[in-house]
Amino acid sequence: MSKAATKRPTESVKPSSPPLLPADSEDSQLSLRLKQYLKPEDIEQVWAAYRFSAAAHEGQMRKSGEPYISHPVAVAGILAELHLDTPTLVAALLHDVVEDTGTTKQQISKLFGKQVAELVDGLSKLDRIEFQSATQAQAENFRKMLLAMSQDVRVILVKLADRLHNMNTLEVMAPEKRRRIARETLEIYAPIANRLGLNAIFQELEDLSFKHLYPMRYRVLAKAVKAARGNRKEVVGKILEAIKQRLQDAHIEADVTGREKHLYSIYKKISGKAGSFSQIYDIYGFRIIVKDLPTCYLALGTLHGLYKPIPGKFKDYIAIPKANGYQSLHTTLFGPFGTPIEVQLRSREMHNIAEAGVASHWLYKITDAHLTALQQQTHQWLQRLLDIQSESSDSLEFLEHFKVDLFPDEVYVFTPKGKIMALSKGATGVDFAYAVHTAIGNRCVAVKINHELAPLRTELHNGDHVEIITAVHAKPNPAWLNYVVSGKARAHIRHFLKSMQSTESAHLGGRLLNQALRALHADPAAIDESHWQKLMRDYGVNSKEEILTDIGLGKRLNVMVAHQLLAMAGGTTERGAKLTGKVLDRITIRGTEGMAVQFAQCCRPIPGDPILGFINKDKGLVIHTHDCPAIRKFRLDPDKWLDVEWDPETKRLFKVNLKLAAANQPGMLAKIAAAIADAGSNIDNVSMEESDDSVYTNMHFTVQVENRVHLAALMRGLRKIPDVVRINRVKGSGSEQRAQ
Ligand code: MN
């Protein structure tokens, strides 16, 4: 089958063909191939796709002057050679209609089913990404990106057939473009074909790339090889006869053929290191195919009896297969004329895998367990597919099983400079920013994905172009920790927050301590440095800041520290009753304390609300409203909370949750948004409850206001909208899930 697969499929669609449905005529090459293995109803589907594609591409020409439809027909022909299934052939015929004719995925889905639509969609996505950088590592990442985006092995198989046909018809392109496509084929597509074990396609892609990339070298080498092959004919014939005879004598049934290296592999060997053409070419290659695995070893022994093996040259790829699943025995023998003879021995089944790789699953039944992870995955997936198919298929479930994730842990995206980065699956804009550089991560404020602004938390997908927007004074946000997936981003964010938090907590701790001191009628400035030193020794810490940070974080009680400092100063304090903290002045909250003071997300206090403070280990001071349901049970326990009040000068904006019931009619959300803007407020978040066709819908808003007066004005404005029937502020846990 290998020879047939490498045949140019273009021959089936000569430009001279009449314009009237040439490909589906009874004796066209595609038609003949389809009849070999498809049922009549499947063939009819292929022709339906052909007619649709021909109509869609009507009037379009290839550069060669042929009608465009000749290209998809040729691609389908290559795949029919591999006996691929009907959806693959249909997708091959339709592979360019989305990009070139404006046909939509929905249309394809309606006419040819969801599965075909998914395949065509996958192919269109591959078409849209372009490979620029040429470094080794980047090429590897790009190959992975293509495979990851394919999801379905059949997508990449169609893509390879597409590329093969384009390479076969490259002559008409301008030299510059020809070289670019040839280089891309050599670096990206040929290695993918190799990796999938599609040997015939791999070799043809390499040789075609070689031809267009180095036309002179190709011509010289091709000529030399042709001449050498002529000279060698006689010798090869003699060795071939000797091997056949010896195997026959041993009663081993075998298919023995002379084997020629493909041009590009000869070229690589010559241009690689030492070795002239004659040295490399002066090796005879043979391939022996036998019926099963044990016979391989039997034939090997027989062969070693005929010619002596060269020590150190034997390789057992049957026991240890190559990464792409390739299996064979390789041995090199001392030939009769002093030249080495390279021999490959394999079973029929191994041969099929060697030539067609993953596609061999479609062509042949495979029983051998020696498959690589990728092949096993494909194999299992195929096995399941065959099971489902035979069981009568539910189309949705069917589709489920077609999805394979070749790189389940990674996602590949482009930087603005066209470099490809591999990130963990689920990575967001923040992960990307930190992957580029720590300083970018620490200063990122937004992300552009495929040139459109998106929230930083947006998950990135294969092939996305990602650009980070930074601001000089931006800082990492603790909320990022909720969605970053990479260890690097997480570690950097934590580190930054920790150092920032301890500074801010120390500041708050200082304020808390001073207030405790003043409540005890002591002047904070009068505390002697030596008392601090003694306290530090007592606590076993190294700095005053550590003690203040601990107070700010609630790990030490400000009143206790104040008493201890004063006791060292020798002053008598009114111990006992005053230790509860009740005598303290209230601490004022400005909202600018940073991370040391947090505003509870359950009730979202705003200036004007009566508030309470809770010292929370690790989080620092958390501010709730007096009536917050989340803290109701602690209210009776005064040791747990701290008297706080708003600083009248507080100026920043605070978030508050609103619930609003309004008529379920178009334009309502816009009216509400306008009223909020008119009141000088911003919308931070909005969500709507699932509407059950009722007249009214509940909407949830998180808006930003300065204080209660501002909020009251905003709510008045909203009530004036006709058909807003109810509006109220939400406090308590009910809103917590929605809070970011
Ligand atoms: Mn194409």
Image: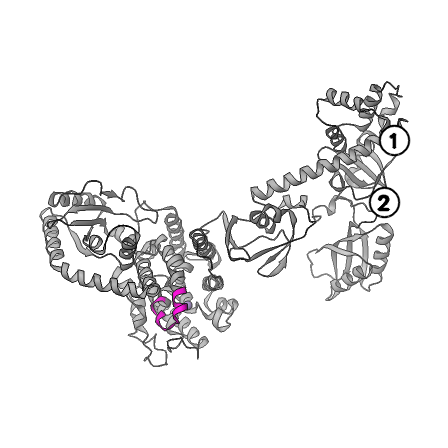
Q: Earlier in the sequence, mark 1 or mark 2?
A: 1
| Left or right relative to 52: residue 207 | left
| Left or right relative to 23: residue 234 | left
Instruction: Inspect the image, locate mark 2, and give the three-letter code of the amino acid beneath it.
Output: Asp
Quadrant of the frame with the N terminus: bottom left
Residue at 42% over, 65% down:
91
Q: Position of residue 628 (x, y in %)?
A: 80, 41
Q: Position of residue 585 (x, y in %)?
A: 88, 33
Instruction: Inspect the image, locate mark 1, and give the three-letter code of the amino acid beneath it.
Output: Leu
Q: Which mark is residue 584?
A: 1
- Vertical arrangement, residue 105 with respect to residue 623, above or below: below
Asked whether the residues under the numbered discs 1 and 2 touch, taking CB atoms below 8 Å apart as contact, a structural biologist would say no
**Towards the viewer: 687 or 415:** 415
- Residue at the farthest right position: 521
The reply to whether residue 507 is visible in this rendering is yes
**Towards the viewer: 375 or 524:** 524
Q: Which mark is residue 609?
A: 2
Indicate which quadrant contains ligand 1. bottom left
- Vertical arrangement, residue 271 with respect to residue 732, above or below: below
CA neighbours of label 1 inside 10 A, class few (<14), some (14 to 19), many (20+): some
**Towards the viewer: 481 or 121:** 481
Distance from Cα at disc 1 to Cα at disc 2: 21 Å
Main SS class of the magenta portion in the image: helix
Q: Position of residue 80 (x, y in %)?
A: 33, 64
Q: Position of residue 610 (x, y in %)?
A: 86, 42
Q: Secondary structure at mark 2?
A: loop
Whether 174 is among the magenta residues is: yes
Q: Which residues are magenta?
A: 167-180
- Vertical arrangement, residue 279 with respect to residue 616, above or below: below
